[in-house]
Image (tube, grey):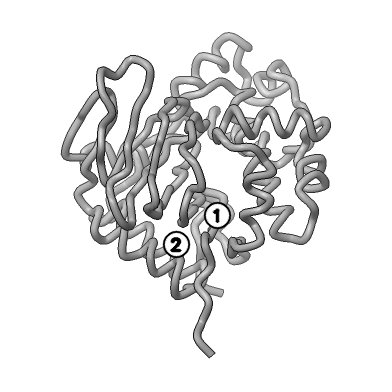
Amino acid sequence: MEKTVPKAVLYLWPRRTVHVGRLEQPVQFSQASASLMVSLDSPFRVSKPDMASVVECTSLLLRPGETADIDPGDGRVGTCYLDALGQDYGLLLPQMTAFQSGYYCGFRRERQLRELLIRMLEEEPDEVSSYQRLESVINPKDENYPEVDSRVAIVVDLIRESVAENRSVEELAQAVNLSVPRLVQLFRQQVGVPIRRYRQWHRLFVTAINVAGGCSLTEAAIQAGFTDSAHFSHTFRTTLGLRPSDVLSALVNTRMVVANALNRATGQAIAE
């Protein structure tokens, strides 16, 4: 029997998330993490209000919190949502060959990334080997990742460990011996978005994991800390530019892979 290729695949790792497939409609990206997009078939079109004209490209690096309207047409797109602390973004910037209309385009290892993403969609590689290959594409020279402020890293961990709780900024600041204004400033400098925005983004990640575990979309969102379905729907639309119902219908043909073997300190997949 001929193998059926899913319309989309979603790999979920603590450090990075990868989605590969067709977008059924143009979307407005406004994520709380940096992201690297690569077309698998034909160039996609990028625009934003202050651009004089639409830009076509085959790879694109977006800063955390940056808004972009993406129209992939009929082509498939791979999107790598990068680490929260901006280390991937720091390594990728020198690997982009063009700066056009406010965006970094032309990833030097675009071909290798495209081949990996197609393989992830069509051949169902495991989460460990997929992560290791993605790591080699992002960091081909095995360089040391840019240093991060340890206090911000601790706050990110606290948010992740208590995703269903609404820990106040005051509580987070106290945990790392900082004043609230200083933590707010450092967090935005390191992560690229405010604390609240990052918390909402991580809750979307946890919601996806819960769906992969068998929950309904509403149940998954509540368990991830959203107060109700309306809160979840609003966050989803403003962050990903899609309605949850669009994704719910797409999940029928989406293969979801959740990493089970992970290095807790780095979020990297490891062999068991």
- Mark 2 secondary-structure assignment: helix
Horizontally, is 204 left or right of 12 in the view? right
Most foreground residue, 155 or 29: 29
* Image quadrant in which you'd find residue 133: bottom left
Question: What amino acid type should be assigned to the residue bearing mark 2?
Answer: Tyr
* Circle count: 2
Q: Quadrant of the N terminus?
A: bottom right
Query: Vertical placement of 95 versus 113: above or below?
Result: above
Outermost residue on the top side: it is: 181
Cβ atoms at labels 1 and 2 below 8 Å apart: yes
Label 1 SS: loop
Q: Amino acid at mark 1?
A: Trp
Left or right: residue 16 compared with residue 160? left
Is 128 in front, or is 233? Answer: 233
**Residue 222: image location, x then y, percent:** 81, 40
Tag shown at residue 4:
none
- Density class for disc 1 (Cα within 10 Å; few <14, some 14-19, many ≥20) is many
Q: Nearer the viewer, residue 93 or 180?
A: 93
Name the N-terminal-most of marks 1 and 2.
1
- Kindly tell me whether residue 131 is visible in this rendering: yes
Q: Mark 1 sits on what residue? A: 13
- At horizontal 68% and vertical 18% (from top left) the residue drawn is 169
Q: Which residue is mark 2?
A: 131
Q: Residues within 10 Å of mark 2 (few under 14, many from 20)?
A: many
Give the image location of residue 32, x and y in percent. 52, 31
